[in-house]
Each structure stands twice: as C-alpha cells, then as structure tokens.
Amino acid sequence: MSFFANELRRLPGLAALGSLLLTLGCGQHDQITSYTVRKPELVDPTLAAKASAPAAAAPDNQTLGLIVPVGDMGWFFKLTGDVQAVEPQHEAFLEFIQSIKFTPPPDAKPSWTLPSGWKELPGREMRFATIHVASDAGPPLELSVIPLPNTSKDTQKYVLDNVNRWRQQLRLPPIGAGDLASSTKTLKVDGHEATLVSLVGKGSGQMAGAPFAPFAGGESGSVPKDHPPLPAGKSGGSGDLRYTMPAEWSPGKPNAISLAAFKVSDGDKQAEITVSTAGGAFLANVNRWRGQLGLSPIDEAGLAKATKKIETLGAMGDYVEIIGPENAAKRETILGVQAEAGGRTWFVKLRGDSQLAEREKPRFETFVKSLKLP
C-alpha cells in the first residue's frame, strides 16, 4: 500500500477533460485507446482514521523533505511549517527538487532553479542555503538545505534513521526498515537515488504520516516508470484512475509529480500532458503557471474572468487557458484544470507550443472529461 495516498486524500491534485472526438485531416475519425492506471491506497489504518477525524483534531504542521545521498555526504532539503502554509507549496516543492543538479565529485555541491516567489538567502552554521518561500498564509516559510556526513555503509539505515528523526520532531512514531518503501517515495535526482517524504503531525515544526499519493511506492498502487499502456477495457480494480487517451498522443514518462503523462508533437512543436494530485488555492496555482510563461499574476477578479467549468472525475473542475507573451522567443500555452474529487485535489495540465496547444485543445478537453474514479 502506498504512503503517499493520504497526502493525495487531503491534497492537491489534478483534473480531467472531454468526450467528443475530433475529426482531422481527411475527415477520418480519430481512434482512441483506453487505459487504466493504479491509484495509490492508504497504507495505514491510522491514516484512514485521521481522514475522518474532526477538523479540530487535524494535524497542525507539515514537512516536505528530500534526502539525497551523494558520496560520503547526504543532502537534506526540508520545507516545514503550518500545514495551511506548506500544503499549497507541494507542486512547487516537487518542481524545485526536479531542478536540482550536483557538481562532479569530490565537491558534489547542489544548484537549482527556484520557483516563482522563492528567494535564496546565504547559508548559516550547518546550512548550505536557506530558501524563503512566499506564503499567503503568513510569513515566508523556510526551506533548509543541509549536508550531513554519511559514515554508514548501509545507506538504507542512514535514510531510515533520518526519516525517523523527522518523524520524532513531529511527535510521530518511528517506522521500521520494512515500512520505508511504503512510507516514502524513491526517485532520481540528477542521477542520484533520493528519498522523498511528506509528514504531518503536531510536533514543534515538522510533520509526518502523509506523503504524496502521486508518488506511492511499492508494487500496490504505483505507476510503472515507463507507464506502459494497459489493454483497452482492462480494469485495474476499485483503486484505478480511468481515462481514454487520444490516438494522436503517446504515453510519456511520469515524473515525481505526475500519476499519468502523455506527449504529442508536430515537427519541432511539442506539448506534454500530465495528471497529478497536489494542493494549493486555484489562484495561487494559476499565478504560478502564469509565472512559468513569463506573465504577471492576476487577482481574484481576473481569475473569475479567465476560468470556465469543465466536467471531470465525476465533478466540475476549474479550467483556464494561459497563453504566453507574443514576443516570447518560444511562445507556449498552458491548459490547466483543477478539480476536487475523491477527497483529493486533481490537476490536468497541457503545456507546450502555443500553435500545437490550440490544435490539441479539443482533444485535451475530451481527455479531461474521460477521467474517472470508480
């Protein structure tokens, strides 16, 4: 069972689109292929109990953490704060860790690209760097980057000990080595195997107990790394995300954020489509997307004008189209949908060449509408 499911339950996510198939070119009908993808499940009965607990008993603090052993050092990236402030930063945090690069050994020092609204400050004492993350819920959050010696030849024990250290800070019980795979997500960061955790608890500024569902580890509920398509019509069970993929799209490679990924191209024009779960207010996510295209943020009034409704996952989602500046060297468009379904926040997003995005817009909307939860 996957540790990240609880996070998906509370959180972030993505939406979905469409039922109408377009006819292109010679007027022949496009063919579609149906797939299913396993959805992470709750890994611990205590997590399910937390899900039904009254709001007053909900956890107060949250930690998003990444551990990257590199040579004789372990690099620790940790964002901690009030759950209401940290939760909206999930997708941005994942975007940040995917940008991390290390210099060649023996130095092996990290560099990165900061998401919009993040500001790097000089390191101090043990810290290699401190990053301030702007928060609508109050003062900026702090993301610390700290290197710690890895003197153990047992990397799994090294990771487990530090995960339990974070859990203890949040007044969470320790886990054993057998629970590590189902309570964390393993991914590659610049070619190095890394461990990602999301913890929620009532400690003095750290959290545990609920990682991101999109990263569910283990065999149950995980998405294969190469995302091979399943035979049309094959059901993955009650825990499946179902959708119909347009024939013009190809399966993509899911990253740390996505539950499903696709790609489409036309010559040198390309676009990527992802389905994921994360968190945050719709306005904050839309402004982050606008920042990715070099556009200034909008306010609630502007968001209302730019948003329309679309059916997806058995609910009504919010749908925006964001087109980059005309004078951009490479003009891009983002089609983004955010919806609440199954106790999670879902995101469906197409990003790519503006001309290609305009062509694929009807197919994207059809795809979004095809997304279903049992």
Image (cartoon, rainbow, N blue to C red):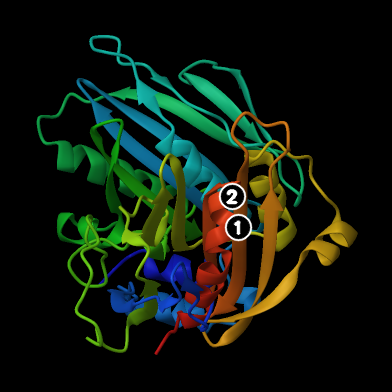
Instruction: Kindly identify which residue carries mark 1.
Output: 358
Discs 2, 1 touching: Cβ within 8 Å: yes
Name the residue type under label 2: Gln
Image side of residue 2 versus residue 344, left or right: left
Residue 186: % across, % down: 26, 49
Residue 23: % across, % down: 48, 75
Residue 253: % across, % down: 30, 52
Q: Residue at x 65, y 40 (%)?
A: 293
**Secondary structure beneath disc 2?**
helix
Q: Residue at x 47, y 70 (%)?
A: 24
Q: Residue at x 50, y 76 (%)?
A: 22
Image side of residue 142 versus residue 47, left or right: right
> Is residue 119 among the parts visible in the rendering?
yes
Residue 11 sits in quarter: bottom right
Q: With respect to residue 10, does 322 lie above or below?
A: above
Instruction: Kindly identify which residue carries mark 2.
Output: 355
Task: Return the mark for residue 76.
Answer: none
Residues 280 and 297: in front is 297
Q: With respect to residue 272, does 113 lie above or below?
A: above
